[in-house]
Image (cartoon, rainbow, N blue to C red):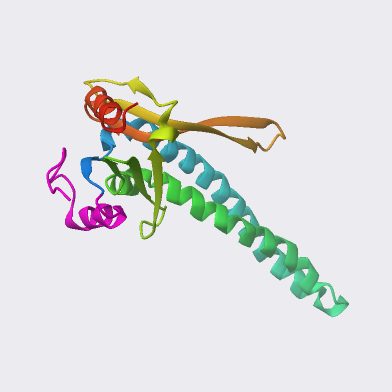
Amino acid sequence: MSSNYVGQGTLSPELEQRVQAELSGGERLVYVGQPKPELYRGPTVFLMIFGGCFAGFALIFFIVGLVMTVGAAGFGAQMAGQGAGVLAGCFPLVFCLFSLPFLLIGGYMATAPIWMPKRIRRIVYALTDRRALVLEPNWFGRNYTIRSYTREGLGRMYRTDRRNGAGDLVFEEFYTASTNSQGYSNTTRNQRGFMAIDRVRDVEELVRLTLGL
């Protein structure tokens, strides 16, 4: 297997080892690349703002629940002789505890400018003489999801140009449905491929020439 390929030397030793571990016998590496973190600035800012609002509402509910719990504790002490003290304090305490997971989730999203660039730098794109590979870490950064696209699976590949020659080389699209708090359904388009890469036109040409598309 040749050790020379486009993008050689751009990965850390750990990521280089991960890519090499995915290759089969005789499979030749042609290209490796990574997304540009600056092209994710918009989604990162959106996640930060949304997470801040989400955490803010959760914090309000937490404080209201805490105040209700303290108030119910005093009321329960007065009603203890009538057997209603425990019941009086249960609901506000549950209400308070129920808001904690949402507070943590919102706080995590609000810190996206800290952890998002680190996560993006651990995403790796690779092209071999047999397939295209996308190695993406999970949200905690330890385990990876590896997606493999052979020539047959790239029939609908297309390119989206961004600024300064960067862009997306999309391999597949899929849609996810969700329901908001008002009960309305939303459909979100998702894309996978070599996303937010530099010199996207050159990479597209390389993929087509290598895999015969």
Tell me residue 73's x, y (percent): 70, 69
Is most of the magenta stretch helix, strand or loop? Answer: loop
From this view, report whether residue 197 is shown above or below residue 57: above
Viewer-nearest residue: 95 or 142: 142
Q: Nearer the viewer, residue 101 or 140?
A: 140
**Which residue is situated farthest in the bottom direction here?**
81
Please, which residue is most extreme toward the right here?
Answer: 82
In the rendered image, the vertical position of residue 55 relative to residue 104, given as above or below: above
Where residue 189 appears, as percent x and y from the top left, is 52, 30
The foreground one among 3 and 197 is 3
Check the picture and name the quadrant holding the C terminus.
top left
Question: Image check: 52 left or right of 77?
Answer: left
Q: Residue drawn 49% across and 48% down? A: 106
**Residue at the image position 47 percent from the left and 43 percent from the top:** 51
Q: Is residue 26 left or right of residue 213?
A: left
Quarter of the image where one finds residue 45: top left
Q: Which residues are magenta?
A: 1-26
Q: Measured from the top left, where is residue 162 in percent x and y? A: 30, 21
Left or right: where 118 falls relative to 52: left
Label count reads 0
**Residue 89, x across and y down, in percent:** 73, 67
The residue drawn where x is 68% and y is 63% is: 94
Answer whether residue 17 is magenta in the image: yes
55 over 161 or under it: above or below: below
116 up-or-down from 72: above or below: above
Tell whether position 108 is magenta. Answer: no
